[in-house]
Image (cartoon, rainbow, N blue to C red):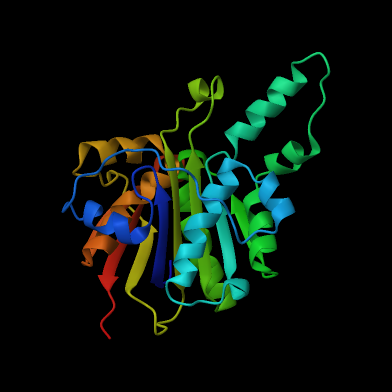
């Protein structure tokens, strides 16, 4: 894959309310405390749409806004790639309960929130962004799939691309079929060229067959990485937070690994 540059990061996760707070934790300077944090209300949505948002939509949007506002990137002028292992388990569970009831009535709001690209739709409404957007799903490899798609789009369009990966725990009984731990949403603003905001470059390739995923030194963060597909990004975020050159491996599709070489951009 061609080289891509990281310009900014946004983060919202269980115990990690934003990127600035998360960085000393990821560097090992502060302990990680897996405390639940209320999802921020998307105040930048119009009131009618704000009332209709599900938790997965709130989760997806908050990290993206942080990534763009931190460097004053125009929110309405950015390609987006949304990726999630399964979308809104909350809404799917509610629809399943409705269909299993005597009335079998499905709320129109729940129905339109159940589609996989619902976060992208609400993002467009909130930001007035009319640029193209892609929504992906690759189960546990969804972050890797989103990263590859974002790199391809950045080079094809020659425009910055915002990658947003998000996953949220499912209610029972869906949680028994796919156990997801906590909430995790990360946003990376990527570009194909060295713009003024570029902080790191990423060289991404398919690793050799014997490669294994990079693990976390912190036991709680390692459990988070394994049990939340969007949190597969944690080893990359550690390298970015430590501001160091590094080589990491992240789970991709069909049992493969992405090999990611992280380099500091010298300005």
Q: How far across and how far down the image is residue 169, in percent?
A: 48, 33
Image quadrant of residue 203? Answer: bottom left
- Residue sitting at 39 percent across and 80 percent down? 197
Position of the N terminus by quadrant = bottom left
- In the shown orientation, is residue 97 left or right of residue 108? left
Image quadrant of residue 31? Answer: top left
- Residue sitting at 17 percent across and 51 percent down? 28
- Residue sitting at 24 percent across and 53 percent down? 26
Q: How far across and how far down the image is residue 207, in percent?
A: 33, 53
Q: How far across and how far down the image is residue 170, in percent?
A: 52, 30
Position of the C terminus by quadrant = bottom left
- In the shown orientation, is residue 81 left or right of residue 106? left
Name the foreground residue: 94 vs 190.
94
- Residue sitting at 31 percent across and 38 percent down? 34
Q: How far across and how far down the image is residue 160, in percent?
A: 52, 74
Q: Judge whether 50 appears above or below 77 on screen.
A: above
């Amino acid at each position: 894959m061609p080289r891509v540059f990281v310009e900014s990061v946004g983060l919202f996760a269980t115990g990690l309310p934003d990127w600035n707070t998360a960085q000393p934790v990821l560097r090992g300077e502060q302990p990680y405390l897996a405390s639940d944090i209320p999802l921020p209300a998307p105040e930048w949505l119009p009131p009618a749409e704000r009332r209709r948002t599900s938790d997965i939509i709130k989760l997806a949007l908050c990290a993206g806004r942080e990534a763009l506002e931190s460097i004053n990137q125009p929110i309405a002028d950015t390609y987006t790639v949304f990726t999630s292992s399964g979308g809104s388990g909350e809404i799917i569970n509610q629809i399943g309960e409705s269909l299993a009831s005597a009335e079998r009535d499905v709320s129109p709001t729940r129905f339109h929130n159940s589609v996989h690209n619902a976060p992208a739709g609400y993002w467009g409404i909130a930001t007035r962004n009319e640029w193209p957007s892609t929504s992906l799903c690759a189960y546990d490899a969804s972050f890797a799939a989103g990263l590859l798609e974002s790199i391809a789009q950045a080079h094809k369009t020659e425009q910055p691309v915002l990658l947003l990966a998000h996953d949220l725990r499912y209610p029972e009984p869906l949680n028994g079929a796919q156990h997801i731990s906590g909430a995790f949403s990360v946003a990376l603003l990527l570009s194909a060229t060295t713009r003024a905001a570029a902080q790191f470059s990423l060289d991404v390739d398919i690793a050799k067959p014997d490669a294994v995923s990079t693990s976390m030194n912190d036991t709680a963060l390692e459990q988070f990485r394994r049990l939340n597909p969007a949190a597969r990004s944690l080893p990359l975020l550690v390298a970015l937070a430590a501001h160091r050159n590094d080589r990491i491996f992240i789970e991709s599709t069909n049992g493969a690994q992405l090999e990611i070489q992280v380099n500091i951009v010298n300005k």
